[in-house]
Amino acid sequence: MSKLTLTTEGETFIVVKRRFAASPEDVYRAHMDPALIAQWLLGPDGWTMPVCINEAKVGGKIRYEWNNGKGGGFFLTGEILELAPPHRIVHVERMHMPGVTPDNRVTTTFEADGAGTLMTMRMSLPDAATRKAMLGSGMERGMEASYARFEALFVKGVAA
Amino acid sequence: MLDTNKMDATLRALSDPTRRAMLARLAQGEATVSELAEPVAISQPAISRHVKVLLEAGLVEQSIDGARRPCRLAAGGLRELDAYLDMLRHALERNYDRLDRLLQAQKDKRKKHP
């Protein structure tokens, strides 16, 4: 429906923006209610989330476990640092691949945008070791990344 | 944390429009420093400094060919970072397409049972 933008900001952040045809309240709830989260936060097709815990309060714990049904799986743990419903979520998360990755602080905001919502998610660009672990997790879909795509995706991001 | 430092160097190298133009030129084939300096109105010493940044970031390689020192894109210089960002984008696109459908289903349900 709406196109996602993913850009790098400076040398350390990734910023993702996406519009939704729903109110900030609805989009916020979909990010905090485990019954809803488990229906969409699944990554590539074929993955499921058999464990979805989000205590939805400041200081509350997060634990998401993913499985691709083919022996691939990893989990994420985190804590909620700030909540300002329905506009802002700040949490910290780390992947267990099973090696644990450095903490990633993620700020997600939801702004009313016409009849819908603009979501902006700002997170750390993972270090090279974390990226390597993620790429080895079975989530990748071909490593034939080309300089042509680098032009399309990355240069625009840096220039933005 | 050598890898992190290298990534920082990569991103720093990419943050400059002149260096991006030089990479775009090198994507078409190897070029010497003076050839790289031609299309941009920048002195050769300044281009040499940009080349140095690109070399240190592992984005460009330079060989010695008699008096020539042609530059070329380093194989794999950006592939791994590009592959990661591509994977992330793909996973997020799938997520948010599913979220669109979930949000629409909630709306439809409310309309039926207000």
Image (cartoon, grey):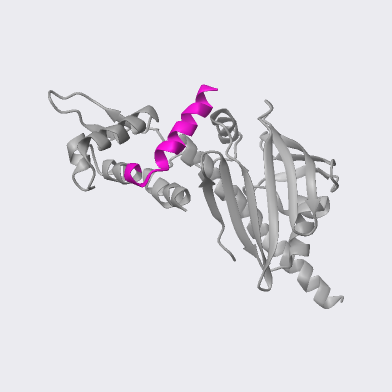
Would residue A64 appear left or right of A143 to someone viewing this image? right
Residue A77 visible to the viewer? yes
Q: Nearer the viewer, residue B1 or A70?
A: B1
Tell me which residue sits at (74%, 54%) in the image: A88
Q: Classify the position of the C terminus of chain B by image quarter.
A: bottom right
Would residue A18 appear left or right of A74 to someone viewing this image? left
Q: Picture coordinates of residue A9 (x, y %)?
A: 53, 46
Q: Picture coordinates of residue B52 (x, y %)?
A: 32, 30
Q: Nearer the viewer, residue B22 or B114?
A: B22
Q: Nearer the viewer, residue A127 or B38?
A: B38
Magenta-colored segment: predominant secondary structure: helix
Q: Which segment did they paint magenta?
A: B1-19
Count the marks.
0
Q: Say whether residue A34 is magenta.
A: no
Q: Nearer the viewer, residue B73 or A109?
A: A109
Tell me which residue sits at (66%, 58%) in the image: A119
Would residue A155 appear left or right of A29 to someone viewing this image? left
Q: Say whether residue B8 is magenta.
A: yes
